[in-house]
Amino acid sequence: MRFLLAAACLAWALPLAAKSDEKGKSPSLESLFLDFSKTQLGAVSSNEAAKKYLYTVQLEKGKLMHKLLGTIYENAYDLYRQGDFDGARELTGKVLAMDPGFQDAAILHRASIELTGAPRPRISERNLVENRFTEGMALYHQGRLVEASQRWEEAVKLSPGNLKARYWLKKIRGELADEHFRRGQKAYQLHRLRDALDQWYSALVLNPRYPRLVGAITKVEAELRRQEANEKLQEALNHYGQGNIDAALKLLDEVLKIEPGEVKARKLILEIRLEIANQHVAEGRAKYKERQYRRSIELFNKAVEHGYDPRKANHLIAKAKEQIQKDADDRRRRAEDEKKSAEDAERRKQEEEEAARKRKEAEAQAKANTKKLEANEPPPEEKAPAQNNDELRRTAQKHWDQGIVAYSKGDIAKARDEWILCKQFDPSHADCAAGLQRIDATYGGTGP
């Protein structure tokens, strides 16, 4: 809104600003508006940079606004001196709309209102200044120094060449500065340091060259910083005693911002940080015992941040990392063992199933052969024309040998079948009869 008002007054102020430039008094409004381009600082990449950017922009715009209003005020004052009170009133009104605290513009605005329509501008202006001076004198004699100072300040602003007003304004400012200095001394004696500083700053504004004032202000500011630091230090100690460690550290940081050389605060910060570090180490050791190694590493690193010996912390961290690696190796080995055990179990299962299948097939074959023998039917492979005795004995011997092989392998059912065939082809084969008797005696019947 203020910038819109400033733009609105350009149409009136630009010609006068150009005249001021020619005289070398102040920069033109055009140049001031063009200077706004200097506030474009480019792209920003972080929150902190953005804050600095915005602060810089606001600061630069504030400076330019101050220059702009100063230029408009000077133009208004030129109109006032030329007797154009309407123009001066309009410009100062715009200045006050943008900055109500612009005191010089307020003084000129009030004077322009009073003088608007005056038949003899020059005489009216001198009378106005004289009236301000007379009012100031009356207020001064009444002991109303501040109001008197305001009247004489208006007279000086409206008529800088008025020597009487300048003399009395300087005199009353000196008296006011003396009064503020005395009040500051009294407040200092009562150890009201802030009140003393307020009074002495007021005196310094009225008289920047007031003797011994800067030294007194410097001394009290140092005492005030020490007082504030001691108060915060005591508060930090209270928090520390109650176990509020974070609050204590925050206050101690504030103490060091106020008094960077505060030895007690630095020492206490080191003690607190070391205590926190030891707590992190103790908690990290507990987590290590609970086999929470990653959490223990985090706690050891936090301990280092708070001042714990990095070499000791690195040793603890290395042990935790070693345990993490060991656990990972153990898990991998267990997984491999479990996989191998599962594969072995699956293989044994398949072998058992295959053996069971073969056993069932052998049993079925033995039963079939037995039925054939009981029916006096020769086996399929032996169905053939009658053979001579030598061939029958050779065939019987062959079945005897096959029965021996089966028997040595534990396949009793097959051995029995072979020997039965052996006996069928050669009933006189004594070994077949003996083998069958052994099977019947040992296993009974058809065997296992």
Image (spheres, rainbow, N blue to C red):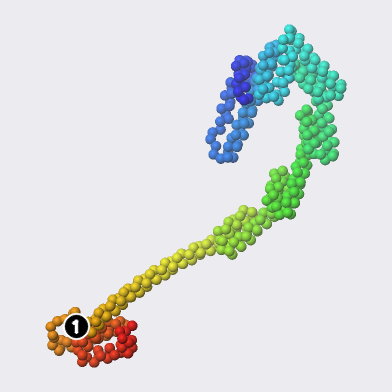
- Quarter of image, res 142: top right
List the residue tagged with mark 1: 378
Percent position of residue 383, x then y: 16, 81
Task: Please tell me which residue is depicted at 27% across the width and 80% down the height of the picture.
Answer: 367
| Quadrant of the rendering where the C terminus is positioned | bottom left
Instruction: Specify whether residue 251 is in view.
Output: yes
Seen from the viewer's position, the closer of residues 446 and 23 is 446
Task: Please tell me which residue is depicted at 25% across the width and 90% down the height of the picture.
Answer: 433
Seen from the viewer's position, the closer of residues 222 and 236 is 236
- Quarter of image, res 89: top right
Percent position of residue 277, x then y: 64, 56
| Secondary structure beneath label 1 | loop
Percent position of residue 116, x then y: 72, 12
The residue lying furthest to the top in this view is 119
The residue lying furthest to the front in this view is 375
Seen from the viewer's position, the closer of residues 441 and 397 is 441
| Quadrant of the rendering where the N terminus is positioned | top right
- Quarter of image, res 17: top right
Judge from the rendering whether residue 187 lies leftward or rightward of residue 448; answer left or right.
right
Judge from the rendering whether residue 196 lies leftward or rightward of residue 352; answer left or right.
right
Instruction: Specify whether residue 216 is in view.
Output: no
Judge from the rendering whether residue 375 lies leftward or rightward of residue 235; answer left or right.
left
Task: Please tell me which residue is depicted at 77% across the width and 32% down the height of the picture.
Answer: 201
Task: Please tell me which residue is depicted at 74% across the width and 16% down the height of the picture.
Answer: 111
